[in-house]
Image (cartoon, helix red, strand yellow):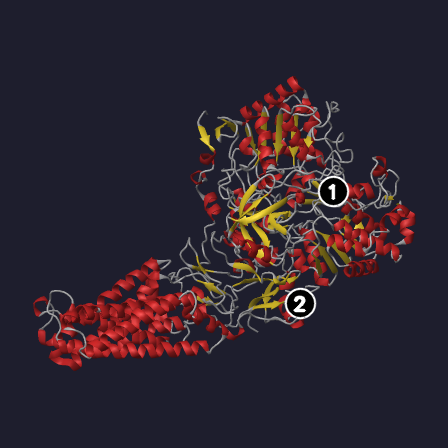
């Protein structure tokens, strides 16, 4: 079966500490003023004192039907066989078409290189058998990454056990971050 | 999302459309107007290469890695309107300079024989409308492919095409009326004005349909169009585009066609109405480019 | 050597180092580069050999006091990434946002790069560079002068909890001063004294892993991150454990909790006293435990008779039904039910009583040393490091300036009352202080009434500051002794249960800085007190600490920790309470001796008058007190503090989020942006602490946000010495 890399993010375990954002910046030398990942908040919902708040980490969804790859005029934006979407710097002209095409606002124009930039699923770490920096550091184990097509992976097991949702389902991008809002008492063992 | 494609892109979209519109005007005037429309044809040919060249210059400067721009021409990515669009524009621009050359007075034509040039001029005048339509409408496809509210309106390529034709015609009218050189004849201008008025009416119709379609679509789309109709961009849309860019020039042009304008006002009115059409055309590109980016899906 | 710099020039952007270090500091992104389609994942045969000079160094973080284990990755001499050490119990392989951001400060252009001696008047911001020899000699001379002329007690020694603190303490005791200022009284004195006088232990642990029901009072583990505890809290919530949070503000912990109770500030003790009332009335307490291990139960019964849930409802504004329900459910979960000891609790004078009530409530549940309950002190179960042998200390000359114990008989000496030390420096009573040595502390921003602290500094003969960055306090120093950043230095070893952990340099110091160990040592030498710190260098000290164990320092450095074999945990004394009666003192013998109510009792807290609001301060996950606001990576995730206003309050004064407002208290006034929310009591205003820096040497932090210390008035609980920060009330208006 082909590899399909993606994330499962358990929002119930996220405390919006933003360690994942700092770890990503450190690991990937992301210039100040930009970020490859984020944690969004629903804001305080309801009326005092019956209020609630929910946190939702995110980053490039490494979509199945990525508009950013379709619109790239030079072929710099590519989807690898393992599903990870990358930017080949050599070919990127910095036209920013892919930035406008991404409905998740996952890309930015790197002010130092002039190229399109975004989450790479820490490919360089995956190649060394390490987890992506954001997953590695997450205090709540909210962020999980792996091969969605491998039933033995942590992400597959989580998806099998809990209801999930994806963002902007109707836009048709086929994003590969699956969100679980329910409480997850135990993170399953797996790859 | 924050603004990624800003004023530079708007300028490019506008000038590309303008050049394409001017080119078609010139082609049609030449092929079907004959001697009577020679001046108009000539001015169209003289004008056409320059706005798009300016637009392309501005575009390259807006790139994050401008020195890498040649990568565009190492490949053809069929899924990317920017890719095939770049090729189309490359040919259009180069050929528009060739076409200009064909229209130069014989004294300036160093290369080639007059008769040969005349033949190629006619051939080019038959080819260029195709390229012009491609240039004018692909800008709409460019925005379509980015899957954003407003940008994905299916009628956008048609809107941009009509707007390009309208601004092209208006520009030709304006230039042929300006300046100390030989002005176009009354008949030429009359036909062009009629064409432009027709295009403005068509444009209004298309905008209306686009808005209705948008408002009947998803909640994200509805909200996006709201920013145009009632929200942040309302003043640009109603005042600058609908008011100054469409209704007033249409009114002035209709008055002109009915010969209701006193003779001494004809010249300033012609210049003004043409200018307002250009003004409106610019802001159509502006408001769509900006409103599409400040709206998002939810 | 005599070139004079201004503060501005010392920390100018132009001064950062060139070359690969600077490139790393600027975070140059190389992009992904050309990847071949065959570069699939998990192949594990990445070309490590081709990366020149890559190494991993295990050390300890210092971005807060939790001291997580860190593994630093160094490539070509540049620290590229910090990750959690999976072998360290404090973080189990994870790092919080501050831990991840350590690299930014290491390479920050705002580091102090060499010793500085002031070249103009104090506070003028003019400095000249000095050699270490000159700076240390100058410091020692001034300190000797003060000792000779005014006696040792005129010299204050301040240091906030850190790994070299034991050696700082040796230095000050060798010098002979009684004056030792920690920051404790600004933090959790009420908790530590409350538990100390109940259990004989200042800070018992909590077994989250088996706990079934927990009540937090202000303790905000999601934002006041204590890595491993925060992880455990998240697991508790995920497991469905009942988590109740008492907080006037809807903190992030509250957002994760099962139940948030928006308690009126300062009234938490009413809640707990009413819980105790219910539990006693319904006989839900662990009777055998109470009989065997506690003293004073009968006194408690009498005291709580009138503390009904109905009474409590009027005080704390939590409904009587809720209080009753929680009491019953809490007791049903015993002994796996914890009323968490917390940290700053509610910052009122009566917080001591709140903590006493919490301590007693735990005792009634019998959760001491039970699964899911409180964990007794682990000192017996922690390996003992080798100690330095040194001469006997001279007797400390004189009484402490901070009122311990003559004004505050119940405050432990190790904690002190720093705000009183500052006040008495100003008043000159009972004697004049003449000098202040401040190490790793920023009193200007931490003690309430900032202006008073500045005045105190201006009054002294001599001020020396040891710090890594140009803090607001360093600005007022006569000499600044720059400490190496934690990634550049050794510190004392840390034993945790049966493991010993090391902090060691990940890279050599970038600038002309020293570890505080060496600063203390060399200062001691110059003071003629070298024999009290008998080590040649850091490694020598660490070797002495390792003496009782069969491991070489090199091995410890390579592995990052050492596990002592055959070390058994000793729980024999778990039920031997270090109180005067040897039992858990529901009725405190010491309180009785002092003529105060011996059992937990209700003390009415002050309330703001009309159009005034409670001023609450607290933490955010992305910053540590007043230390990290200059860290540009952290500013990207939390750029500035804002005043939380309830929607109704904002509407009343006509502001929306991000509008400027003015907060004014009795002692000061600040301008700050508003954050309008439903997640706070309408009578409260909240701001994250630590912003509003006034040091121009902190280029990114200078002027950012607003300082709570400029608003807080100094109110001290006479029993615990705790600073009642929340007894400051403010007005708010549109700017």
Q: Is residue A63 shown left or right of residue C544?
A: left
Q: Find the residue positioned furthest to the left.
A: B107
Q: Where is residue C100 in the image (x, y as percent from the top left)?
A: 58, 50
Count of picture labels: 2
Q: Position of residue A74 (x, y in %)?
A: 38, 66
Vertical position of residue B119 compared to residue C727: above or below: below
Examine the image and state in which quarter residue C193 appears: top right
- Residue B74 visible in the displayed image: no
Q: How far apart are marks 2 and 1 (CA)?
A: 37 Å
Q: Is residue B107 shown left or right of residue C55?
A: left
Residue highlighted by disc 1: C190
Which quarter of the rendered picture does the C terminus of chain A lie within? bottom right
**Is there CB contact under 8 Å for labels 2 and 1?**
no
Name the one closer to the observer, C724 or B104: C724
Kind of element beneath mark 1: helix
Q: Find the residue positioned furthest to the bottom.
A: B32
Name the one closer to the observer, C527 or C696: C696
Q: Is residue C338 shown left or right of residue C82?
A: right
Name the one closer to the observer, A182 or C686: C686
Label 1 resides on the chain identified as C
Label 2 resides on the chain identified as A
Mark 2 is surrounded, within 10 Å at the Cα level, by few (under 14), some (14 to 19) or many (20 or more) other residues, namely: some
Vertical position of residue C461 compared to residue C241: above or below: above
- Residue B158 visible in the displayed image: yes
Residue highlighted by disc 2: A182
Nearer the observer, disc 2 or disc 1?
1
Mark 1 is surrounded, within 10 Å at the Cα level, by few (under 14), some (14 to 19) or many (20 or more) other residues, namely: many
Examine the image and state in which quarter residue C184 appears: top right
Examine the image and state in which quarter residue C145 appears: top right
Q: Find the residue positioned furthest to the top.
A: C149
Which quarter of the rendered picture does the N terminus of chain A lie within? bottom right
């Amino acid at each position: 079966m082909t590899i399909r890399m993606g994330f499962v993010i358990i929002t119930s375990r996220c405390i919006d500490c933003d360690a994942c954002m700092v770890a990503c910046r450190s690991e990937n030398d992301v210039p100040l003023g930009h970020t490859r990942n984020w944690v969004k908040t629903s804001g305080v919902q309801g009326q005092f004192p019956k209020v609630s708040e929910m946190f939702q980490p995110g980053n490039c969804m490494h979509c199945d039907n990525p508009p950013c790859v379709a619109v790239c005029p030079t072929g710099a934006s590519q989807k690898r066989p393992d599903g990870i979407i990358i930017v080949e710097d050599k070919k990127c002209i910095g036209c920013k078409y892919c930035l406008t095409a991404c409905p998740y606002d996952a890309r930015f124009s790197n002010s130092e290189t002039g190229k399109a930039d975004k989450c790479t699923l820490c490919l360089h770490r995956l190649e060394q058998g390490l987890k992506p920096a954001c997953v590695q550091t997450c205090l709540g184990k909210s962020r999980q990454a792996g091969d969605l097509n491998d039933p033995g992976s942590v992400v597959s097991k989580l998806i099998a056990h809990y209801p999930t949702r994806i963002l902007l389902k109707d836009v048709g991008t086929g994003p590969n971050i699956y969100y679980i809002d329910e409480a997850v008492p135990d993170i399953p063992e797996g790859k | 999302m924050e603004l990624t494609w800003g004023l530079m892109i708007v300028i490019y979209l506008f000038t590309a459309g303008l050049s394409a519109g001017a080119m078609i005007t010139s082609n049609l005037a030449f092929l079907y107007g004959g001697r009577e429309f020679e001046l108009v044809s000539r001015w169209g040919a003289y004008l056409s290469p320059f706005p798009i060249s300016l637009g392309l210059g501005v575009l390259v400067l807006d790139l994050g890695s401008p020195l890498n721009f040649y990568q565009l021409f190492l490949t053809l990515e069929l899924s990317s309107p920017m890719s095939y669009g770049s090729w189309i524009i490359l040919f259009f621009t180069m050929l528009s300079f060739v076409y200009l050359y064909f229209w130069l007075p014989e004294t300036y034509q160093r290369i080639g024989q007059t008769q040969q040039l005349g033949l190629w001029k006619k051939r080019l005048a038959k080819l260029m409308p195709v390229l012009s339509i491609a240039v004018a409408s692909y800008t709409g496809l460019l925005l379509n492919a980015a899957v954003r509210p407003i940008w994905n309106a299916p009628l956008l390529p048609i809107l941009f095409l009509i707007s390009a034709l309208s601004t092209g015609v208006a520009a030709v009218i304006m230039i042929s009326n300006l300046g100390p050189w030989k002005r176009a004849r009354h008949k030429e201008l009359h036909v062009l004005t009629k064409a432009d008025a027709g295009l403005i009416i068509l444009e209004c119709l298309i905008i209306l349909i686009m808005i209705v379609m948008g408002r009947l679509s998803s909640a994200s789309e509805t909200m996006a169009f709201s920013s145009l109709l009632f929200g942040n961009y309302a003043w640009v849309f109603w005042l600058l585009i609908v008011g100054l860019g469409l209704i007033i020039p249409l009114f002035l042009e209709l008055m002109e066609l009915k010969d209701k304008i006193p003779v001494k006002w004809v010249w300033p009115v012609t210049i003004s109405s043409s200018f307002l059409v250009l003004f409106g055309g610019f802001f159509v590109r502006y408001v769509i480019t900006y409103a599409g980016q400040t709206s998002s899906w939810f | 050597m005599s070139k004079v710099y201004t503060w501005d020039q010392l920390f100018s952007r132009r001064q950062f180092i060139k070359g690969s270090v600077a490139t790393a500091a600027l975070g140059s992104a190389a992009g992904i580069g050309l990847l071949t389609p065959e570069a699939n994942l998990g192949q594990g045969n990445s070309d490590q050999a081709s990366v020149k000079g890559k190494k991993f160094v295990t050390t300890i973080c210092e971005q807060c006091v939790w001291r997580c284990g860190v593994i630093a990755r160094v490539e070509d001499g540049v620290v590229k990434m910090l990750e959690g050490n999976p072998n360290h119990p404090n973080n189990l392989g994870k790092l919080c946002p501050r831990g991840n951001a350590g690299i930014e400060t290491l390479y920050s252009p705002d580091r102090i790069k060499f010793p500085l001696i002031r070249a103009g008047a104090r506070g003028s911001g003019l400095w000249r560079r000095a050699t270490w020899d000159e700076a240390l000699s100058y410091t020692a001379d001034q300190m000797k002068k003060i000792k000779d002329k005014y006696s040792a007690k005129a010299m204050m020694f301040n240091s906030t909890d850190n790994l070299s603190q034991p050696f700082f303490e040796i230095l000050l005791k060798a010098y002979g001063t009684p004056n030792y200022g920690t920051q404790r009284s600004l933090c959790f004195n009420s908790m530590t004294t409350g538990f100390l006088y109940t259990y004989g232990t200042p800070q018992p642990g909590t077994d989250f892993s088996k706990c079934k029901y927990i009540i937090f009072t202000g303790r905000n583990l999601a934002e006041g991150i204590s890595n491993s505890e925060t992880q455990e809290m998240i697991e508790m919530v995920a497991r469905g454990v009942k988590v109740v949070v008492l907080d006037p503000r809807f903190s992030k912990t509250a957002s994760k909790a099962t139940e948030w109770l928006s308690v009126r500030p300062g009234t938490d003790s009413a809640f707990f006293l009413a819980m105790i009332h219910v539990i006693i009335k319904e006989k839900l307490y662990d009777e055998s435990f109470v009989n065997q291990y506690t003293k004073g139960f009968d006194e408690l019964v009498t005291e709580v008779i009138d503390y009904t849930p109905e009474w409590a409802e009027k005080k704390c504004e939590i409904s009587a039904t809720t209080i009753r329900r929680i009491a019953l459910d809490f007791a049903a979960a015993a002994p796996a039910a914890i009323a968490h000891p917390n940290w700053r609790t509610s910052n009122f004078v009566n917080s001591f009583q709140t903590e006493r009530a919490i301590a007693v409530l735990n005792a009634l549940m019998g959760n001491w040393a039970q699964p899911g309950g409180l964990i007794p002190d682990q000192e017996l179960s922690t390996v003992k490091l080798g100690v330095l042998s040194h001469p006997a200390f001279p007797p400390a000359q004189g009484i402490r300036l901070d009122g311990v114990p003559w004004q505050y008989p119940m405050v432990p000496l190790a904690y002190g009352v720093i705000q009183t030390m500052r006040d008495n420096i100003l008043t000159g009573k009972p004697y004049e202080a003449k000098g202040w040595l401040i190490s790793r502390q920023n009193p200007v921003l931490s003690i309430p009434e900032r202006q008073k602290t500045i005045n105190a500094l201006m009054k002294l003969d001599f001020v020396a500051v040891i710090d890594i960055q140009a803090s607001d306090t360093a600005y007022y120093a006569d000499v600044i002794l720059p400490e190496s950043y934690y990634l550049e230095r050794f510190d004392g070893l840390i034993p945790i249960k049966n493991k010993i952990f090391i902090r060691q340099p990940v890279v050599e110091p970038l600038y002309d800085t020293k570890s505080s160990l060496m600063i203390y040592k060399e200062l001691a030498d110059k003071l003629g007190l070298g024999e009290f710190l008998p080590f040649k260098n850091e490694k020598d000290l660490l070797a002495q600490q390792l003496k009782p164990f069969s491991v070489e320092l090199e091995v410890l450095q390579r592995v990052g920790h050492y596990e002592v074999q055959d070390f058994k945990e000793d729980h024999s004394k778990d039920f031997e309470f270090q109180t005067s009666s040897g039992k858990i003192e529901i009725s405190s013998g010491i309180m009785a001796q002092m003529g105060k109510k011996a059992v937990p009792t209700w003390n009415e807290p002050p309330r703001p008058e009309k159009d005034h609001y409670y001023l609450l301060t607290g933490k955010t996950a992305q910053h540590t007190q007043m230390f990290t606001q200059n860290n540009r990576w952290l500013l990207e995730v939390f750029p500035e503090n804002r005043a939380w206003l309830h929607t109704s309050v904002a509407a009343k004064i006509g502001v929306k989020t991000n509008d400027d407002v003015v907060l004014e208290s009795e002692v000061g006034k600040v301008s700050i942006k508003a954050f309008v929310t439903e997640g706070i009591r309408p009578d409260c205003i909240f701001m994250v602490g630590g912003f509003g820096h006034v040091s121009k040497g902190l280029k990114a932090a200078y002027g950012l946000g607003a300082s709570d210390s400029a608003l807080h008035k100094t109110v001290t609980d006479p029993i615990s010495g705790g600073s009642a920060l929340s007894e400051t009330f403010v007005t708010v208006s549109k700017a």
